[in-house]
Image (cartoon, grey):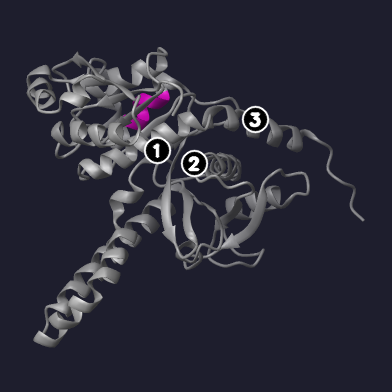
Amino acid sequence: MNQEITLALDAMGGAQAPEMVLRGAEMALRRHPGLHFLVFGKENALLPLLARLPRLAEAVEVHHTDETVLDDDKPSVALRSGRQSSMRLAIDAVAEGLADGVVSAGNTGALMAMAKFALKTLPGIDRPAIASFFPTRRGESVMLDLGANVECDAENLVQFAVLGDAFARSVLGLVEPTVGLLNVGSEDQKGNDAVRAAGVRLRSALSPIRFYGFIEGDDIPAGTVDVVVTDGFTGNVAVKTAEGTAKLFTEFMSGAFEHSLSARIGYLFARNALGKLRMRLDPRRYNGAVFLGLRGIAVKSHGSTDALGFAHAVGVALDMKVNDFLDKIRVDLGRFEAAGAAPQPAAM
């Protein structure tokens, strides 16, 4: 990492904050020397922790505030009354150009409301979307929206496709990612009006996106496409179901190996392979949902994660900055707008 990058951290967001935030930042610093952090939170909680993390202390600038956003605060209330909260001040640092991105494990709704208000949306984007990684047979895919927009029209879905395409190229390093619309079937006549209309636009020969077509739920873990596009209601249900299934599978597997003496002996022979499987399914490796469509970089860490998970979220924000994600988004939006403005080919 040749350029100096500064990230703003909401130190008070998350179930294990602020220790989880600072230890996660230290892990990220070890991986990426040269990182600098603006940390917002209560000094009396932060300074004793930093005294035990001398390497991180040299890379941190602490900004004191007594105010925090609670997990059960309504977004509208947090937006009005939380102007001096650790979350809002961290976001404002990005808006004012003092930081290259913000990372928080706090209230998702409040973070989205504050980020949208302070950072604004990019030209051509009506609503930001929440995107994150998803493990598949082929590696990793991007999925959006994961809960920011419960109801979406065709234009929203098309914009999400553009955002997801740019995100996959910037963060996953894919040259021509494939994009699919999540539907109840792969046939053209399936789905609601918004999904079908979005499919028509994305199939257009003038579209700069490599559109695969409609996909179904089992295509997500199969890795059929690199970018999965859906509305926030469906996306949130899908990702929570997947997380719960992975947790259930892990519990079942652990119980099976404790069932008998022979099973315990079998575990001794299989533990290396099981360790690789556990690492592959570890949700901390995929921590860091991104608010796409904003004029700044905003990353949401899972509220219940630990330091390792938060370090991965910091890594996502870093990757977006290093790979000039915002500039690529602007270029892609321009390409798609130009394609949409061009005359449609005459029917044969």
Relative to 10, does residue 206 appear above or below in the rendering?
below
- For residue 55: magenta? no
Looking at the rendering, which quadrant does residue 63 occupy?
Answer: top left
Question: Circle 3: is it few (<14), some (14-19), or many (20+) Cα within 10 Å?
Answer: few
Residue type, numbered disc 3 = Val
**Residue 66 x %, y %:** 13, 17
Instruction: Find the residue positioned furthest to the right.
Output: 348
Position of 182 with respect to 24 (left or right) is right
Query: Can residue 106 be seen here?
Result: no
Quadrant location of the C terminus in the rendered image: bottom right
Q: Residue at x 21, y 33 (%)?
A: 21
Which tag, 2 or 1, sits closer to the chain's start? 2
Q: Which residue is mark 3?
A: 331
Q: Residue at x 14, y 28 (%)?
A: 53
Spatial CA span between label 1 and label 3: 21 Å
Quadrant location of the N terminus in the rendered image: top left
Relative to 262, does residue 40 appear above or below in the rendering?
above
Residue type, numbered disc 1 = Val
Q: Which residue is mark 1?
A: 316
Task: State which region is magenta.
Answer: 111-116
Q: Residue at x 27, y 63 (%)?
A: 278
**Residue 181 x %, y %:** 57, 55
Q: Nearer the viewer, residue 68 or 64?
A: 64
Which tag, 2 or 3, sits closer to the chain's start? 2
- For residue 112: magenta? yes
Question: Circle 1: is it few (<14), some (14-19), or many (20+) Cα within 10 Å?
Answer: many
Position of 243 with respect to 297 (left or right) is left
Q: Which residue is mark 2?
A: 171
Query: Can residue 253 be seen here?
Result: yes
Residue type, numbered disc 2 = Val
Q: Which mark is residue 119?
A: none
Looking at the rendering, which quadrant does residue 98 occupy?
Answer: top left
